[in-house]
Amino acid sequence: QVQLVESGGGLVQAGGSLRLSCAASGRTFSSYAMGWFRQAPGKVREFVAAITWTGGTTHYADSVKGRFTISRGNAKNTVFLQMNSLEPEDTAVYYCAAAARLGPRGLRIGTTYDYWGQGTQVTVSS
């Protein structure tokens, strides 16, 4: 069993920053990529960012490009999301996910991912 554990969420004022972390534990596996998704109340889950483990290619949703940065940790299957210039619209539960391989629909689709964390709440006040 693989567990993904997120940390770093919290309450921040608009314009502030937060850094989310995600670490995998349990059964050893090799991920092709790791990503972040978010879900706001009453809305569907949406893609935020992803990074491939080999090569470090990054992908971002247009809504966060230039404000958020995804990066890999030194430990395998560890990923970070640096969030700057936060806006109230960024308020959501943020989920970390790991994909064992690249699916046909790409890294922006949730069904590509095999493992998910429990989520961490990010609240941005205006």
Image (cartoon, rainbow, N blue to C red):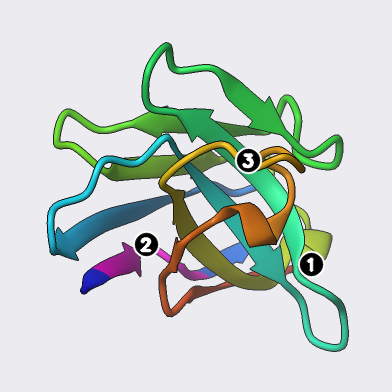
> What kind of secondary structure does the magenta stretch mostly adopt?
strand
Q: Position of residue 38 (x, y in %)?
A: 67, 65
Q: Residues within 10 Å of mark 1 (few under 14, many from 20)?
A: few
Residue 70 vs 45, above or below: the answer is above
Q: Amino acid at mark 2?
A: Gly
> In which quadrant of the rendered image does the C terminus lie?
bottom right
Q: Is residue 35 visible?
A: yes
Q: Amino acid at mark 1?
A: Ser
Range of residues picked out in magenta: 3-10
Give the residue at x 56% y 52%.
Answer: 36
Residue 89 vs 78, above or below: the answer is below
| Side of 50 where 124 appears, left or right | right
In depth, the one of 14 and 57 nearer the eye is 57
Q: Residue 49: which disc?
A: 3
Give the residue at x 77% y 54%.
Answer: 87
Residue contact between numbered discs 2 and 1, judged by CB atoms under 8 Å: no
User: Could you tell which of marks 2 and 3 lies nearer the N-terminus?
Assistant: 2
Q: CA distance from mark 2 to mark 3?
A: 16 Å
Q: Residue 8: which disc?
A: 2
Name the residue that disc number 1 marks.
Answer: 126
Residue 6 lies in the magenta-colored region? yes
